[in-house]
Image (tube, rainbow, N blue to C red):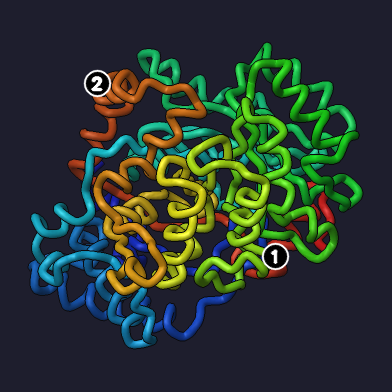
Amino acid sequence: MARNAFMRDWDPEGTRLPIKLDSTSNGEFAPVPLDATNRLANRLAQEAAGENARRRGLGRRSFMVSACGAASTLLAHNRANAAAGRTGGFFELEEVAAVDPEAAAEGLEGREFVFDVQGHFVGQHGLGRTGLGDAQQFIKDIFLDSDTDMMVLSFIPSRREKELLTIQEADEARRIIDEMEGTKRLLIHGRANPNQEGDLEGMDELAEKWGVVAWKCYTQWGPDGRGFFLHDEDTGLKMIEKARALGVKNICVHKGLPFGQKSYRHSLASDVGIVARMFPDVNFLIYHSGFIAGQKEGPYDPGRGEGVDELIRSVEENGVARNSNVYAELGSTWRYALRDPEMAAHIIGKLVRHIGEKNVLYGSDCIWYGSPQDQIQALRSFQISEEFQERYGYPKMTPELRARIFGLNATRPYGIDVEEALRRARRDAIERRRSAYRQQPNPHYLTFGPRTRRAFLANLRARGGSPV
């Protein structure tokens, strides 16, 4: 098919920005509308795209799919944030990157090992989809349109009869990739909500038959709307002990992003440090790092009792050392923080300083947000201001630190030999498809999660959860 004919499938006029700043949520929190600064950022980016496309002698669509298109958008975001006084974090790009492909590539392209520890593939009960929820589209969004090398396929909470992704569907997606000359790019979680009948018993089959690499649980969720604490004897502790007995000692816990006021206390990370101290041989990967959408994150405040601060407080007050068995994951948190790079500086700065530079993990929460390439490009260029580094003791975002967050840190709990993984990935069928595809890339720049509170509540009801 000719390029132009194919391009008509996806935004031929080039109206969609390559860095997607909108109200989309991952279905686990009510969408938050963009503020005035975000709307200005998008408007400036659209204006810059038209002007810079003309300067490059390109149509808008061709410009948007280039590295210059992404650089131009991020630079427009810098201007909007600076106008609003948000100077604690920014996207470190030369202004010329908006029109110079080499400068854009220097700032946005890389060869890090990108290991996304939170991905989603929505199955037969998924909502907010656009007909793209098949395995081949998933492969395109994750492995062709982004620089992702590996991903862990996770789950979201639901009654067993209303799963948005069954273990069979997850395994089907993994097999599609595995069969391409033995690649091991996709790993899978097993769901373990111990307050739902059958989940504890089902852990045996998940470990033995399906080869899951970790367990995913939601402490704020339950079939009757009531959650649990990780240190509750009849639920959380039983789950942890079962995981240890089965030899799968990675437990991924959704913390933060509360569904509503019911069981809100269970969504907080107050219990993480307690069990991390009790079970030093178990890795606790804290999804979203306790972040709460709609709440500001500032300098660490141990008395706050919510958000990222509560994760840090729980870990430190229980004597759990930095860079030990508690990991802070950035799925949806990083994507949301793109709205305010100053807040992003506080989030990443606090986590690296208190949880550890070896224990902050990149996750995208895609495909709810479409392809994760915009999140990757933003993280590659993100910088914490010198002022914040000096005032709060935050780290400078160096290539070494970014490489750790992007994937090297996650190799420890998952037991991955990164050299072997990269060697395999650089010559497999996915890499060949990626190289050929990128000669004429055709990203859609769409998001698939709910964008309104009404859609969010419908999503909750569909999987048997309680919205309040």
70 lies left or right of 369: left
242 lies left or right of 446: right
Amino acid type at mark 2: Arg
Label 2: how many Cα within 10 Å (few below 14, some 14–19, many 20+):
few
Image quadrant in which you'd find residue 83: bottom left
Amino acid type at mark 1: Gly
- How many angstroms separate mark 2 from mark 1 (CA)? 48 Å
Q: Height in image: 145 above or below 38?
A: above
**Picture coordinates of residue 227 (x, y %)?**
84, 49
Q: Residue at x 65, y 59 (%)?
A: 310
291 lies left or right of 362: right
The residue beneath circle 1 is: 305
Q: Height in image: 434 above or below 6?
A: above
Q: Quadrant of the C terminus?
A: bottom right
Q: Quadrant of the N terminus?
A: top left
Is residue 36 visible in this depiction of the protein? Answer: yes
The residue beneath circle 2 is: 427
Helix, strand or loop at disc 1? loop
Helix, strand or loop at disc 2? loop
Q: Residue at x 91, y 49 (%)?
A: 224
Q: Are marks 2 and 1 in contact (CB under 8 Å)?
A: no
**Picture coordinates of residue 249 (x, y %)?**
63, 25
